[in-house]
Amino acid sequence: MEYIKLSNGVKMPTLGYGVFLVSPDECERCVSDALSVGYRLIDTAQAYQNEEGVGNAWRKSGIKREDLFLVTKVWISNAGEEKAAKSIDESLRKLQTDYIDLLLIHQAYGDVFGTWRAMEKAYRAGKVRAIGVSNFQAGRFFDFAHYVELKPMVNQLQCNTLIQQTDIEPIHAEFGTKMMAWGPLGGQGVDGIVKSEALTAIGAKYGKSAAQVALRWLTQRGVVAIPKSSHKERMAQNFDIFDFTLSDDEMAQIAQLNQHDTGIINFGDPQFVKYLIQNYG
């Protein structure tokens, strides 16, 4: 496993297992499989309604807590200082842990500044080792990071070989923020990565699949990737990416595949924001 160092010195694995859209009934089994394969970073969220499955799986695994990196996110319905604080304690209970390694604001709307104050307090109290945001696109991210006391250590965005998020990189660098990629093999509205002829051709040189090349490209950029699969064999394949290194020419070749720099979902679309606030705010 390879690691990145966050702005506060915390080491974070560059590859993890995500449980978005994994049903509560299946989550424990899937996370148990992922841990047995070797994953030590598990990404969940309050909105996924499967934090309990993550907690049950790691507790039964026999793995020491300090060897795990647990990530969860505060949902918009829990926005605001008081509600967020209560939700953090509830996430700790469901995850069966005394601390969360990385806590994110899930969406850029609602009382995000109140939520952040609760997260800062949880961080200083030792309930959280690192804090950050999710789905904050460039303008929103800059506005938020400019005003908060503790700067976001991570921003989780849709990022892959077709959606490379290059425009936001200088803004992240200004605040010492690392990028975490959801949908690293595609995600909502993206097809073609695992069948890419360009990635397949590069992978053939190393005996790797297009998916493995896509994940390796991210981790070599210092982007944390959290692929999801309910199949243990695919989990193992996605995990097997640290025994080869892409050349500079190959990295540049893959950079030319970019199609959508900011992702398929426009998180600044007023209709999308209206939907979030009306349904979850």
Image: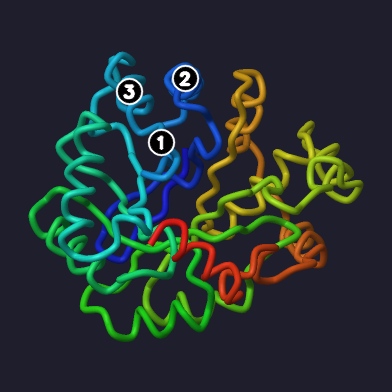
Query: Mark 2 Cα within 10 Å, few/some/many (few <14, many 20+)?
Result: few
Three-letter residue code for mark 2: Asp
- For the view shown, which residue lies furthest in the front direction? 278
Residue 242: percent from the left, percent from the top? 58, 38
User: Is 94 above or below relative to 159?
Assistant: above
Q: Earlier in the sequence, mark 1 or mark 2?
A: 2
Q: In the rendered image, which residue does mark 3 sit on? A: 58
Going from N to C along the chain, the mark reached first, 1 or 3, is: 1
Q: Amino acid at mark 3?
A: Trp
Left or right: 29, with 69 as reference point: right
Look at the numbered disc 1 and give the secondary structure of its residue: loop
Q: Residue 98 appears in which quarter of the rendering?
A: top left
Is 262 drawn above or below residue 189 in the view shown? below
Q: Residue tagged by mark 2?
A: 25
User: In front of the other: label 1 or label 3?
Assistant: 1
Q: Earlier in the sequence, mark 3 or mark 2?
A: 2
Q: Nearer the viewer, residue 203 or 55?
A: 55
Q: Residue at x 33, y 39 (%)?
A: 69
Q: For the residues labelled 3 and 2, say whether their Cβ atoms are less than 8 Å apart.
A: no
